[in-house]
């Protein structure tokens, strides 16, 4: 069966900002007024130590996404190299998939969005595993649901069309 190549680019800055936003909002929700230290630990910041850990969590999430993509995965053009932070952090995570020719291209945008959300949820779960363990499970469940959605989208196909039948002339 013939194949088509699909390339999905995920903006790393947007992923990082989504992780920051989710941890920030969770910290605000947990703020009782007398627990500023706990709130500050929950909220991912832009200080180098926090940012490095966020990138590690994103890297782990991206590696987990590779397992979800499985047999369709062709090329990963960017891997995070957190050891050389910040010099080695790419702007884009690019995933190239080899899909059957009858893959439904209408789901590409949803697939990209779900991959983004999967990485964010998984990375937030990784951050919360360190800073707010009771919230971590919520994001792990969300990433598991997204993994299932991604798997279903990868199976989307276009049905073959039936050739139009011409009327048979009467003798």
Image (cartoon, rainbow, N blue to C red):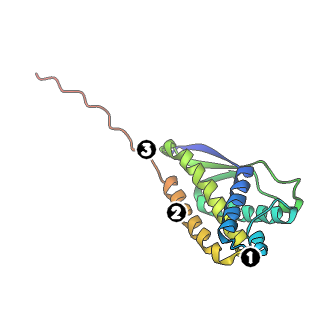
Tell me the distance, in whole angstroms, between the alpha carbons under discs 3 and 1.
57 Å
Tell me the distance, in whole angstroms, between the alpha carbons under discs 2 and 1.
40 Å
Q: Is residue 73 left or right of residue 37?
A: left
Residue 143, x across and y down, in percent: 59, 65
User: In the rendered structure, are the residues bearing label 3 and label 1 in contact, judged by CB atoms less than 8 Å apart?
Assistant: no
Q: Is residue 140 left or right of residue 127?
A: left
Q: Quadrant of the C terminus?
A: top left
Choose the circle earlier in sequence order: 2 or 1. Answer: 1
Q: Is residue 66 left or right of residue 45?
A: left
Which of discs 3 and 1 lies nearer the camera? The answer is 1
Q: Looking at this view, is 135 or 62 the one in front?
A: 135
Which of discs 2 and 1 lies nearer the camera? The answer is 1
Tell me the distance, in whole angstroms, between the alpha carbons under discs 3 and 2.
20 Å
Residue 136, x across and y down, in percent: 65, 73
Label ID, residue 34 = 1
Q: Which residue is mark 3?
A: 158
Q: Residue at x 32, y 37 (%)?
A: 162
Q: Which residue is mark 2?
A: 148
Choose the circle earlier in sequence order: 3 or 1. Answer: 1
Q: Residue at x 38, y 41 (%)?
A: 160
Q: Is residue 150 visible?
A: yes
The residue carrying pointer 2 sits among few (fewer than 14), some (14 to 19) or many (20 or more) residues within 10 Å by Cα, namely few
């Amino acid at each position: 069966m013939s194949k088509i190549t699909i390339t999905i680019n995920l903006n790393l800055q947007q992923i990082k900002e989504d992780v920051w936003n989710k941890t920030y909002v969770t910290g605000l929700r947990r703020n009782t007024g007398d627990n500023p230290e706990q709130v500050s630990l929950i909220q991912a910041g832009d200080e180098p130590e926090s940012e490095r850990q966020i990138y590690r969590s994103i890297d782990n999430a991206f590696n987990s996404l590779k397992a979800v993509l499985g047999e369709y995965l062709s090329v990963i053009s960017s891997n995070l190299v957190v050891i050389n932070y910040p010099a080695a952090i790419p702007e884009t995570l690019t995933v190239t998939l080899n899909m059957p020719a009858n893959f439904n291209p209408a789901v590409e945008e949803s697939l990209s969005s779900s991959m983004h959300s999967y990485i964010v949820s998984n990375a937030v779960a990784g951050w919360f595993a360190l800073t707010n363990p009771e919230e971590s499970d919520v994001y792990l469940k969300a990433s598991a649901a997204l993994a299932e959605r991604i798997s279903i989208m990868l199976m989307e196909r276009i049905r073959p069309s039936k050739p139009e039948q011409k009327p048979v002339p009467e003798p």
